[in-house]
Amino acid sequence: MSANNSSQWSNETNPDPVSLPASVLVCTIVSSSLSIFGAVVIFVTYCIVTVAKNQTRRLLVYLTIADLLTAVGNLMGAVRYTLRDESEYINKRDQMAVNCTHTDQICVIQSSITTFSSLASFFWTNIIMVHILMTLISQREWSRFFIKVIYHLVSWGVPLVITFLAASMQALGEDFSISSGPWCWIKGCLKPGEVIFWMTFTGKGWEILTYFLTMAFYILMKFYMIKRKMRFKDRSLNHLREEDELYIMIFFVIVILRVVGTARYFMAVTKAIDHDLLHSFGQTDMVLLHIQSVGDSAQAFCNCILFCIRDTDVRRELWKRIRACCQSRDERKPLITEINTEVN
């Protein structure tokens, strides 16, 4: 893509890289691990909790699959960064400055996973908001077969095409944490303008669009719910459970968790305009990097808190299943003790 167009980047990356502090790696590893745990809890509740078996929760499961892949990818990137050899890393970076096609295959694979999963997460977030809005308007579960097919084609197909294009154009790879944490994304050795284009096309552009779309859906749903509440005092006429209304809070979850990463993206755009995409971090950028390392990996865990722990019906039934499982185990112990006593 830009193998012969990185002379300017070569001059800018001569200084030794500033290694990320261990605290950034810890933030990423802990956040990713919590999200993997949260994703498992969401899957389990969907399988065993009766009240969770509806179309909206099924869409949440699809969103969680995407968020789980993101958490696994970010964890893979953090572990790779932790285990790297510093001198070898400097050597590879110098080689990339001369030949931008040179990259680490593990880095490319991880970047492909997280690019695809992040895009899928954005699309599924918007689809959940659309689904809830249409359910409120129609007052029934909006789940026709044709609509479901469209959901999957858009939410998995579009991210797959975008990721394939980026990979085929050799845009994915080591990004020197220009606008990410200790994981790979867009090759930092590309020309600054190309770096910004691919960051926008493979993630940040869709992320910012998701902010505005989910905000619009949130306002429309709140307006519709307030209007309906004023017209009908009986909540039974509202198709959504009170807990299901938490799904509209997805707008706040995605904005709160990812807005810092968006801020760092705009900082990278500013540096690109000045042709100064150096691998160095100011104090502000380093603080934002810590927050981003937590937020970009934490969505599955936050969704677990919101839709499993915060949901009273789901929490009660899940706790009832856990207690029943523990009691059944305790009931077996006296029997075993009794048998052992008779044998003796």
Image: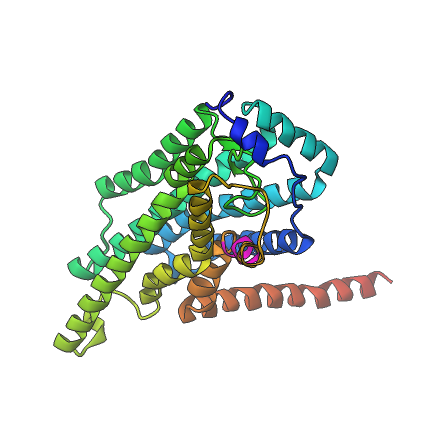
Q: Is residue 272 visible?
A: yes
Q: Is residue 55 visible?
A: no
Q: Which residues are magenta?
A: 290-295
Residue 270 in percent (x, y) is at 43, 47
- What residue is drawn where x is 52% and y is 33%? 187
| Looking at the image, residue 161 lies above or below residue 285 | above
| Looking at the image, residue 235 lies above or below residue 283 | below
Q: Residue furthest top?
A: 4
Left or right, 46 with respect to 244, comes to: right
The residue lying toward the viewer, choosing from 195 and 270, is 270
Residue 64 in percent (x, y) is at 44, 50
- What residue is drawn where x is 27% and y is 53%? 213
Left or right, 5 with respect to 286, comes to: left
- What residue is drawn where x is 12% and y is 75%? 231
Q: Quadrant of residue 239?
A: bottom left
**How many marks can you see?**
0
The residue lying toward the viewer, choosing from 245 and 5, is 5
Looking at the magenta stretch, what is its main secondary structure?
helix
- What residue is drawn where x is 45% and y is 50%? 267
The residue lying toward the viewer, choosing from 154 and 326, is 154
Coloring scheme of the render?
rainbow
Residue 28 in percent (x, y) is at 59, 52
Q: Residue furthest left?
A: 231
Any magenta on residue 24?
no
Considering the image in quadrants, where does the C terminus appear?
Answer: bottom right
Q: Residue furthest bottom?
A: 233
The residue lying toward the viewer, choosing from 175 and 232, is 175
Q: Quadrant of residue 289?
A: bottom right
Residue 291 in percent (x, y) is at 53, 58
